[in-house]
Image (cartoon, coloured by chain):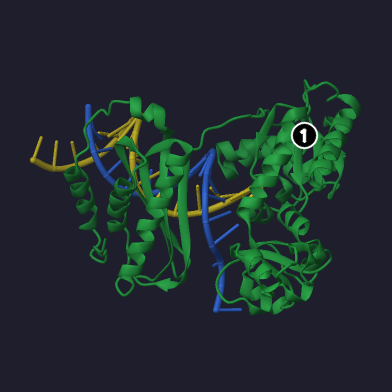
Chain colours: A green, B blue, C yellow
Amino acid sequence: MRRIAHLDMDAFYASVELLRYPQLKGMPVVIGGGRRQADDALLERHEGLALNQIPVADFPLLRDYTGRGVITTATYAARQFGVGSAMGLMKAAKLCPQAVLLPVDFAQYRHYSQRFKAIITGMAPLMENRGVDEVYIDFTDVPGGQRQGGRSLARLIQKTIFDDTGLTCSVGVAPNKLLAKMASEFNKPNGVAIVGESDLESMIWPLACRKINGIGPKADEKLKSHGIETIGQLAARELQWLMDTFGQRTGAWLHDAAWGRDDRPVVTESEPVSMSRETTFERDLHAVRDKAELGGIFTRLCEQVATDLQRKGYAGKTIGIKLRFDDFRSVTRDITIDCYTADAAEIRRLAGLCLKRAPLHKRLRLLGVRVGTLLSAEEAANLVPKMAPGPVEYASAASKTIAKDPLTLDLF
DNA sequence: TCTGGGGTCCTTTTCCTT
DNA sequence: TCTGAAGGAAAAGGACCC
């Protein structure tokens, strides 16, 4: 039978940080805010000491932080003060001012991510990436993958990862991805859980609907408004009622999920669909008063996306922007052209046309640039465009839209 | 003093063409 | 030339995930 594992690293970011700063073990630590300059600053003040010898008292504290940002991860000791992921740093500073604040060091997390994934593919080659700290693994045809329902292979992978990296993970094994994902949460940290088809009623149905991967806060609220709190209650609803209430597709999916049905394969490789860069400003910016600053940021974002595309060997033909206003509402605008591009100046020009179609009378807190409908640079180069694109056409297409909104500012 | 950044996927709306 | 229907593609928005 099909045996699918979901492997989830335990408190990944925090655990990686504790490898570097073991002296912080057991202390309230939050990770968030800007990029890492912490090591350099700390080392500069402690000549001759290694990172793991620096006194705890000398780490930067949350109470001293000023600026925007959210918590990416908090250690258990910090969570006891009520701080947690996605909380604003300023709010967290009120709750736990004495917490050590470490900046996000994505390069480091990626390094450990590659290491543990290499270990897994060495033991079970059918692995699907689900972000930096999670994977699905198809145990079905791996030698020993069926033993004890997958438990022995799961344990072996856990041990091999720990011996190499010092990091722990939790694994769930089940007949499909949906159940495996839920199972991996059962015995955290450093646990293994096996869920079979016959365990549906006892292990899955008592859980909250929110535990289903794909049911977020909105869907959960709607389910609750109909008196559906648990997966078992969801399973008890008629398929037709679910389709009438949530739409054909979503309704059918909810029904399948509640009954533990999921036949999605483990996908070992996939092509990216879009690449983007966005940034939240230190302070909200005004399109007129801060025009120069905004223009500089805008150009830089376009250059960063272009660099990302070129480095990874892709080009795209849908260029778009994203704006977030001071009231946190956001809008997007995009344009699709006939030929693929990864050129910074071209992206900048097209993104500029998109910007002209957006309302700019409110202050901005975020600006983003996205390139979608990607194709490998190689394939894109071999394509003959159906129609030679002319700048005049874009300009007229854009000005048609501008005319509809007198509040739109033509600034870029 | 709220609320990051980088994605995917789906639904709805809008626009264009026939 | 106007109107409306239909269908498809593109655009926009939003939910969700890590």
Residue drawn at x 59%, y 45% as measured from the top left: A245
Residue drawn at x 61%, y 39% as measured from the top left: A251
Quadrant of the drawing holding the C terminus of chain A: bottom left
In the rendered image, residue A277, in percent from the top left (x then y), is placed at: 46, 53
Q: Chain of mark 1?
A: A
Q: Which residue is mark 1?
A: A5
Horizontal side, residue A174 vs residue A147: left or right? left
In the rendered image, residue A378, in percent from the top left (x then y), is placed at: 40, 28
Look at label 1 and name its amino acid: Ala
Q: Is residue A61 above or below residue A203?
A: below
Q: Is residue C7 above or below residue A334?
A: above
Residue drawn at x 22%, y 31% as measured from the top left: A387
Q: Nearer the viewer, residue A258 or A46?
A: A46
Q: Nearer the viewer, residue A140 or A347?
A: A347
In the rendered image, residue A204, in percent from the top left (x then y), is placed at: 81, 42
Total of numbered circles in the picture? 1
Q: Nearer the viewer, residue A358 or A321?
A: A321
